[in-house]
Amino acid sequence: MSRTRTAVLLAAALLAAGCAAEDQAVPGTPGPAPALAGLYDTARTYQEAASRGDWHTACAVSSVRRQGGSIPQCVDSHPASTPEPTPTAAPTRTFDPPRYADGSTPAPRRTRERHGPERASTGPVSVTGALPIPAEGEHPAGYAVLVSFSVHWSGEAPTTTRRAVRMVREGGGWRVDQLATLHPGETSLPAALGGRR
């Protein structure tokens, strides 16, 4: 009986030691994962609000750094959800498309047109993963999550948008601090967030 008891105690001690080592924080990261349910809810709230153009709600769950200092400043920095038509047509600016490191350019994205009701519909928002990530430049340490949702423009096949989102603890809750749209085939959330604003 004492050998069995010793074996059980030894197994329990080894199991506890293994779990403790697994829970240790990676240097420069925010530490062991606290309850992450609020983290997922905040990321989902941000994306759902941004998709419908509700910048007041999206800015309210953003970090102070991302807000630009305050919620009103953040709201003012985003386009109105229903743009006002202009009485005179302004000349259209043209820009060279951005380029990836390999020299290719991304496929053009449709955007809302200023003089029309055209708007993409979006599907349900999915939030997965919660990888601890270290501080990077002006971004504090936090957790990277993957936010996915479908986008459907009238008359076209739906596409899926995937974003890496840096979530940080601020003011007693989770806040969105950084976003990066993942390119096709890109899978590393920390790499996608590294060096991007």
Image (spheres, rainbow, N blue to C red):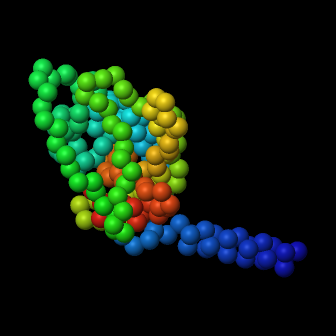
Q: Which residue is pictured at 36% across the width and 39% down the height?
A: 110
Instruction: Say left or right for 15 vs 104.
Output: right
- In the image, residue 164 lies at what x, y percent? 42, 54
Residue 22 visible in this rendered orientation of the protein: yes
Q: Quadrant of residue 31?
A: bottom left
Instruction: Say left or right for 31 vs 172.
Output: right
Q: Which residue is pictured at 36% across the width and 47% down the height?
A: 108
- In the image, residue 94 lies at what x, y percent? 19, 46
Q: Quadrant of residue 75?
A: top left
In this rendering, is residue 179 above or below 23? above
Residue 35 visible in this rendered orientation of the protein: no
- In the image, residue 46 lies at what x, y percent? 38, 39
Judge by depth and name the residue closer to the eye, 171 or 59: 59
For the N terminus, the quadrant is: bottom right
Which residue is outermost to the right?
1
In this rendering, is residue 15 above or below 179? below
For the C terminus, the quadrant is: bottom left
Judge by depth and name the residue closer to the eye, 87 or 83: 87
Q: Which residue is pictured at 42% across the width and 43% down the height?
A: 43
